[in-house]
Amino acid sequence: MFDNYKKVAPKIISVLWGLWGLYFVVIGFALVGVTYWSDKSFIAEAIDSVVGVEFSGRQLDIITLVLFDAGYNFIWAGAVAFISSFFIWKRNIYAMFLATLVGCFIELPIFLPSPAEIEYTRTVGTIIPTLGAWIAIILSIHFIYSDKQNSKKVLTEV
């Protein structure tokens, strides 16, 4: 049974990281596109409808810059995870570790308390990718450290 797990686990992990990476690349391009090509009043209205706080002037410029930077970070993190998923499919432990590390750093702020006193509800758009990423992270860590003998064998096969 354990041997079957070692054959199937990288495939499941690969699919999870591939979907997570693709999702974040798309979200990143959407954020960069919205902040780069749209009118700032659109961003102000969107923030007001989600968070319930109105911004204008210099505050809106700073928020636009932060959203642009977040979009760029989503693009590179998603690209790393998506490309790593192809190597994970071939049982590459290093790619699995890289995708897990990037996924942890991108998903970590979801669990950190917000410094602002703003309450908002998490939508399905944030819950599902977070859940998928943490399942992939847990499976990756379990796969990497579950059997030291097989891990050494996989590392020598790469």
Image (cartoon, rainbow, N blue to C red):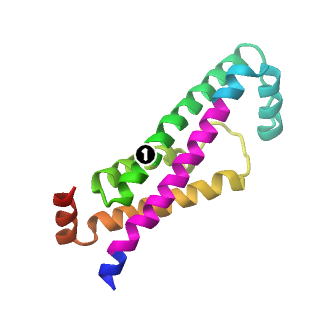
Residue at x-position 38% and y-position 65%: 10
Residue at x-position 41% and y-position 52%: 86
Residue 157 as seen in the image, left or right of residue 21:
left
Residue 40 in the image: x percent, y percent? 77, 20
**Mark 1 falls on what kind of element?**
helix
Question: Considering the image in quadrants, where does the C terminus appear?
Answer: bottom left
Answer above or below: position of 120 versus 116. below
Q: Main secondary structure of the magenta part?
A: helix
Instruction: Name the residue furthest top.
Output: 58
Residue 150 within the segment the image draws in magenta: no
Residue 124 in the image: x percent, y percent? 70, 56
Question: Considering the image in quadrants, where does the N terminus appear?
Answer: bottom left
Closest to the observer: 116 or 67? 67
Residue at x-position 38% and y-position 62%: 140
Magenta residues (range):
6-31
Residue 13 within the segment the image draws in magenta: yes
Answer above or below: position of 75 versus 9. above
Residue 68 visible in rendering:
yes
Residue 56 in the image: x percent, y percent? 78, 18
Closest to the observer: 14 or 109? 14
> Counting other residues with Cα less than 10 Å from the Cα at mark 1, is it few (<14), some (14-19), or many (20 or more)?
some
Q: Which residue is mark 1?
A: 83
Residue at x-position 65% and y-position 36%: 116
Task: Tell me which corner region of the image, top left, top right, bottom left or bottom right, holds residue 57.
Answer: top right
Residue 73 in the image: x percent, y percent? 51, 33
Residue 99 as seen in the image, left or right of residue 111:
left
